[in-house]
Image (cartoon, grey):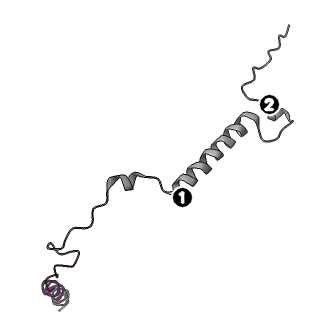
């Protein structure tokens, strides 16, 4: 009895899948459906307004980060001196 129940359920599922009516021609999954609209390629590669604004914001942040890296967090402190300044070498006897 235990084996017959799962077999009956499986048979009912397979029978249910086989009885699906054919898709109408205007259904997107139908092989007879028309193809979707084609979009020109140049429209896909163009940056929109949001992308341009984001790019401007990121370039400003990059310039600020470069300034921060070069001069440090606070002006007037020893940490504020440029990092590419040559170090003074001390000669010890």
x and y, in percent, of residue 35 in the image: 21, 68
Residue 6 or residue 80, whichever sits in front: 80
**Residue 78, horizontal then vertical, whole percent:** 84, 32
- In the displayed image of the protein, which residue is found farthest to the bottom? 1
Left or right of 81, for residue 42: left
Question: How far from the left and from the top, in percent, is residue 54?
Answer: 57, 53
Q: Residues within 10 Å of mark 2 (few under 14, many from 20)?
A: some
Compared across the picture, whether 51 is left or right of 8 comes to right
Label 1 residue SS: helix
Picture quarter containing residue 29? bottom left
Give the quarter of the figure containing the N terminus.
bottom left
> On the rendered structure, is 37 left or right of 46?
left
Residue 50: numbered disc = 1
Which residue appears farthest toward the top when viewing the image? 93
- Check residue 51 for magenta coloring: no
Q: Residue at x 33, y 53 (%)?
A: 41
Viewer-proximal residue among 80 and 31: 31
Q: Which numbered tag is attached to residue 41?
A: none
- Labelled pair 2, 1 in contact (Cβ < 8 Å): no
Where residue 73 appears, as percent x and y from the top left, is 78, 41
Above or below residue 29? Residue 44 is above
In which quadrant will I find the C terminus? top right
Q: Which residues are magenta?
A: 11-27
Q: In the rendered image of this protein, does residue 81 appear above or below residue 86?
A: below
Query: On the image, numbered disc 2 is attached to which residue?
Result: 81
Whole-number angstrom distance, CA of label 2 to CA of label 1? 37 Å
Please tell me which residue is depicted at 59% across the width and 49% down the height of the picture: 56
Q: In this rendering, would 54 be left or right of 73?
A: left
Q: Circle 1: is it few (<14), some (14-19), or many (20+) Cα within 10 Å?
A: few
Residue 15 lies in the magenta-colored region:
yes
Looking at the image, which residue is at 52% across and 57% down? 49
């Amino acid at each position: 009895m235990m084996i017959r129940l799962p077999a009956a359920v499986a048979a009912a599922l397979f029978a249910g899948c086989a009885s699906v009516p054919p898709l109408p021609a205007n259904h997107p999954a139908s092989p007879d459906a028309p193809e979707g609209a084609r979009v020109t390629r140049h429209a896909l590669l163009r940056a929109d307004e949001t992308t341009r604004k984001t790019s401007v914001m990121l370039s400003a942040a990059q310039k600020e980060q470069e300034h921060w890296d070069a001069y440090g967090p606070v002006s007037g402190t020893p940490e504020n001196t440029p990092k590419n300044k040559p170090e003074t070498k001390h000669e010890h006897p």
